[in-house]
Amino acid sequence: MAQILMPMAMLSLLSIGAIFGFFYAWVCSTMWGLDAVDPKTAITAMQAMNASVRNLVFFPGFFGTLFFLAITALVVFGLRRRRPAFLLAASAAVYVLGALAVTTMIHVPMNEALAEVAIPADRETAQQIWEAYSPRWQFWNILRTIACGLALAMTGYAIFFLRDADAK
């Protein structure tokens, strides 16, 4: 098991880093861009993006991240490397609570509700719909981005301790 430890740890780091980057891109560009366009366009675009994210490229990264972190934590714990095992387990827990739970309990219902919205003919109604959706969606996305950033940092820190032969 020790010989596959670092590749497993690096896969954990890569997967949490990819998810962090995915959520971060929504924070610093995508949602600001949608807020800047006509609300009918924003609703249409968000509906299309939400539908397109359900794919075979996103799913393994989103759900596989928990698997990689948890399995790596178990292997590290089995090798009696307590500090990095704790960090990896904590990273997995933060990911579950801060990303998976927020996504399934907040974002998915919001996205499904938006998917049912017919694009209104008038700009004012579209503006009301978008203003009811975007700030709440962004608040929770910032939270899950921060959670993934914390999980990424903990995973990197765990790898730092895995390199130290005296880590417990």
Image: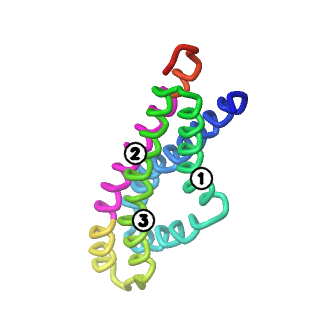
Please name the predominant secondary structure of the magenta segment in the image: helix
Q: Indicate the position of residue 139 as horizontal and vertical percent values.
A: 30, 55
Residue pictured at 38% horizontal, 52% vertical: 97
Say if the magenta span includes residue 146.
Answer: yes
User: Could you tell me how far apart the alpha carbons at marks 3 and 1 are, in whole angstroms?
Assistant: 15 Å
Vertical placement of residue 138 versus 154, above or below: below
Residue pictured at 52% horizontal, 21% vertical: 161
User: Could you tell me how far apart the alpha carbons at marks 2 and 3 are, in whole angstroms?
Assistant: 15 Å
- From the image, tell me which residue sits under label 1: 64
Quick check: 113 left or right of 167?
left
User: Could you tell me how far apart the alpha carbons at marks 1 and 2 are, in whole angstroms?
Assistant: 15 Å
Q: Indicate the position of residue 49 as horizontal and vertical percent values.
A: 53, 66
Residue pictured at 33% horizontal, 77% vertical: 126
Task: Identify the amino acid type marked 1.
Answer: Gly
* Label 3 neighbour load within 10 Å: few <14, some 14-19, many 20+: few
The span picked out in magenta is 134-157
- Work out whether mark 3 precedes mark 1 in sequence or the reverse, and give the earlier one: 1
Q: Indicate the position of residue 5 as horizontal and vertical percent values.
A: 65, 31
- From the image, tell me which residue sits under label 3: 104
